[in-house]
Image (cartoon, grey):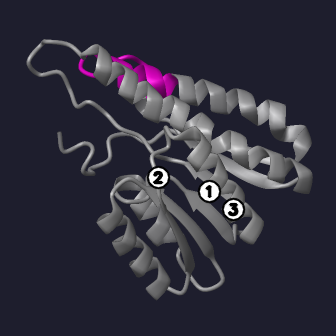
């Protein structure tokens, strides 16, 4: 059965925006989050023109309490079938050889790993009570092997990949499916750097 109520983080650009556009259609409720208001509203407007009902949240996935409150409100209004924890950042590749700074490493882990956890955990309670739902976490082919130009990105995606694979088994008995998505290089604003 196709999901009818879908939450996507990082929906203001890149893969998240493409997913929102792909899922948009009559009878679909989309809950879209992102940090870039103008771009998020443009995606929401496009999806609404395709017939979807759209709710947006201008949120940073590292803001755990605010994100949890928003997810709870979205789920109460329209029980979620699919949650796509997609928001992610990269520091770019280290062409100058200076390495990643400590603040950059921490920010990448905060968004790419903590942001996924902050998205998934609040959705699990309601899905467990309904005994159905799907969680999709956005890992990467970069999570299979570390690359010297982006160590924090690779490590964060390896953690997401492994966490998602582990969740799949632990949630199976609750009726919740878990998908781990590992895209390769995708042309987007994030990869333009």
The residue stretch that appears in magenta: 143-158
Badge 2 or badge 1: first in the primary sequence: 2
Q: Are marks 2 and 1 in contact (CB under 8 Å)?
A: yes
| Alpha carbon separation for disc pair 2 and 1 | 9 Å
Image location of residue 80, percent across then percent down: 72, 62
Circle 3: is it few (<14), some (14-19), or many (20+) Cα within 10 Å?
A: few
Determine the secondary structure under disc 2.
loop
Instruction: Identify which residue, 51 or 177, lies in the foreground.
Output: 51
Whether tag 1 and tag 3 are in contact, CB under 8 A, the answer is: yes
How many badges with numbers are in the image? 3
Q: Position of residue 173 (x, y in %)?
A: 91, 39
Which residue does the image show at 39% across and 21% down from the upper left? Answer: 106
Relative image position of residue 29 (x, y in whole percent): 63, 74
For image coordinates 37% across by 60% down, the residue present is 12
Assess whether mark 3 and mark 2 are in contact (beta carbons under 8 angstroms). no
Taking the image as shown, residue 177 lies to the left or right of residue 142, namely right
Q: Position of residue 158 (x, y in %)?
A: 50, 23
**Looking at the image, which residue is at 38% across and 65% down?**
40
Residue at horizontal 57%, vertical 65%? 31
Q: Nearer the viewer, residue 134 or 115?
A: 115
Which circle marks residue 70 in the picture?
1
Distance between the alpha carbons at the discs numbered 2 and 3: 14 Å
Describe the element under mark 1 as helix, strand or loop: helix
**Image quadrant where residue 36 sits:** bottom left
- Judge the density around disc 2: few (<14), some (14-19), many (≥20) Cα neighbours within 10 Å: some
Please tell me the numbered disc located at residue 59. 2
Report which residue position mark 3 lands on. 73
């Amino acid at each position: 059965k196709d999901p009818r109520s879908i939450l996507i983080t990082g929906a203001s650009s890149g893969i998240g925006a493409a997913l929102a556009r792909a899922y948009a259609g009559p009878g679909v409720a989309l809950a879209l989050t992102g940090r870039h208001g103008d771009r998020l509203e443009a995606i929401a407007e496009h999806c609404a023109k395709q017939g979807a009902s759209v709710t947006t949240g201008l949120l940073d996935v590292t803001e755990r309490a605010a994100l949890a409150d928003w997810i709870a409100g979205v789920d109460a209004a329209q029980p979620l079938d699919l949650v796509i924890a997609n928001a992610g950042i990269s520091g770019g590749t280290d062409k100058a050889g200076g390495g990643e700074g400590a603040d950059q490493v921490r920010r990448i882990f905060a968004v790419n790993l903590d942001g996924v956890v902050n998205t998934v955990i609040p959705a699990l309670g309601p899905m467990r009570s309904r005994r159905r739902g799907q969680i999709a976490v956005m890992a990467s082919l970069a999570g299979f092997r570390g690359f010297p130009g982006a160590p924090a990105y690779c490590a964060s995606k390896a953690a997401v990949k492994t966490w998602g694979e582990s969740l799949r088994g632990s949630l199976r008995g609750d009726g919740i499916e878990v998908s781990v998505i590992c895209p390769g290089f995708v042309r987007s604003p994030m990869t333009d750097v």
